[in-house]
Amino acid sequence: MSFHDDESSDVGPSGQSRLESFLFSCELSSKVPFYTFQGDEEEDLEHFLELRTVCLGNGAKEESNVVEVTAMNHQGKTISVPVANLHIKCLPMVSLGEFELKAPVTIRLKAGTGPVSVSGLHLIATQVEDSNLSEEEEEEEEEEEEEEELPAIKPAKKKQKQ
């Protein structure tokens, strides 16, 4: 599932959801072993972190670097899961695809000294009320209403030859 800036999708009969995406990146090392991703506290916004890649940075040592993610599961419990075990000689980078998590999310360098770069997308979902429809959407709705109001067209009667 991929999202683009300002993409809109239906979420139900009462409104729509607008999704914006922004580039995300953080670097983990022995000096900074974790990063916590949190969204704004506004009620009408939902923040998601879509992790894409985890890779060793320049100067990484010959050791295992384990990256762990801590977030909430569907029951609201916090769980920690290792997502990458990187080594400079055999696996310097891992592609996570589109690994999407709802904020807050903590990314931790569980083992190793790094540096490890984590990148992805910061997704912000906003609820949009029906009254905030764009002008184009309003025009489309008006055209649909006009089409419904037109009477049925009857075929013309042919004149009979005399």
Image (spheres, rainbow, N blue to C red):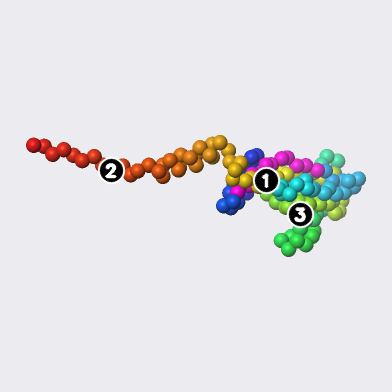
Nearer the observer, 162 or 74: 162
Identify the residue position indicated by label 1 in the image.
126
Q: Earlier in the sequence, mark 3 or mark 1?
A: 3
Q: For the point 71% across and 61% down, which residue is it?
A: 74
Between marks 2 and 3 in the image, the one whose residue lies nearer the viewer: 2
Who's the residue at 87% across and 49% down the image? 33
Mark pair 2, 1: CA separation = 47 Å
Residue 104 painted magenta: no
Chief secondary structure of the magenta portion:
strand
Q: Which residue is mark 2?
A: 154
Where disc 3 sits, the SS reads: strand
Amino acid type shown at disc 1: Thr
Q: From this view, report whether residue 74 is shown above or below residue 48.
A: below
Badge 1 crowding class, 10 Å Cα cut-off, few under 14, some 14 to 19, many 20 or more, is: some
Tell me which label, 2 or 3, sits earlier in the chain. 3
Q: Crowding near pointer 3: few (<14 within 10 Å), some, many (20+)?
A: some
Give residue 69's mark. Answer: none
The magenta span reads: 15-26
Name which quarter of the figure residue 59 lies in: top right
Q: Which residue is mark 3?
A: 83
